[in-house]
Image (cartoon, grey):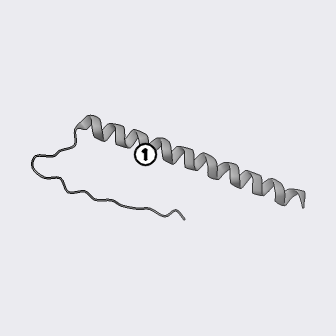
Amino acid sequence: MTDYKLDITQLSAKKYVSIADLKKYFADNQQAAQDADSTQDKVQTAIADEVKKN
């Protein structure tokens, strides 16, 4: 099970997020999630290899 965190930011009428900002935010976070999944896969493989050795 994965833990999630939700951050909510309320913007005033004079502050807004552009579509480009949103796209960059989602792209950056998607890459971070993929990196975390890759690391988790490597750890699980390493553990499985150790278990097989014993």
Of residue 36 and residue 52, the one placed in the foreground of this image is: 36
Residue sitting at x 52%, y 62%: 2
Image quarter of the C terminus: bottom right
Instruction: Classify residue 11 as left or right of residue 3.
Output: left
- Pinpoint residue 38: horizontal percent, then vertical percent: 61, 46
Question: Residue placed at 44% from the left, 62% from the top?
Answer: 4
Give the x, y percent position of residue 5.
Answer: 41, 62
The residue lying toward the viewer, choosing from 12 and 44, is 12
28 to 11, vertically: above or below: above
Amino acid type assigned to the residue bearing label 1 in the image: Asn
What's the residue at 28%, 38% (across, down)? 21
Q: Can you name the residue that lies furthest to the top here?
A: 20
> In the rendering, at what x and y percent does residue 7 appear?
33, 59
* Residue at screen point 53% across, 44% down: 34
Q: Residues within 10 Å of mark 1 (few under 14, many from 20)?
A: few
Residue on which disc 1 sits: 29
50 left or right, relative to 7: right
For mark 1, give the secondary structure. Answer: helix
Q: How many marks?
A: 1
Q: Quick one: which residue is furthest to the right in this view?
A: 54
Quadrant the N terminus occupies: bottom right
Residue at the extreme left of the image, as rendered: 13
- Image location (x, y in percent) of residue 12: 13, 52
**Left or right of 23, for residue 38:** right
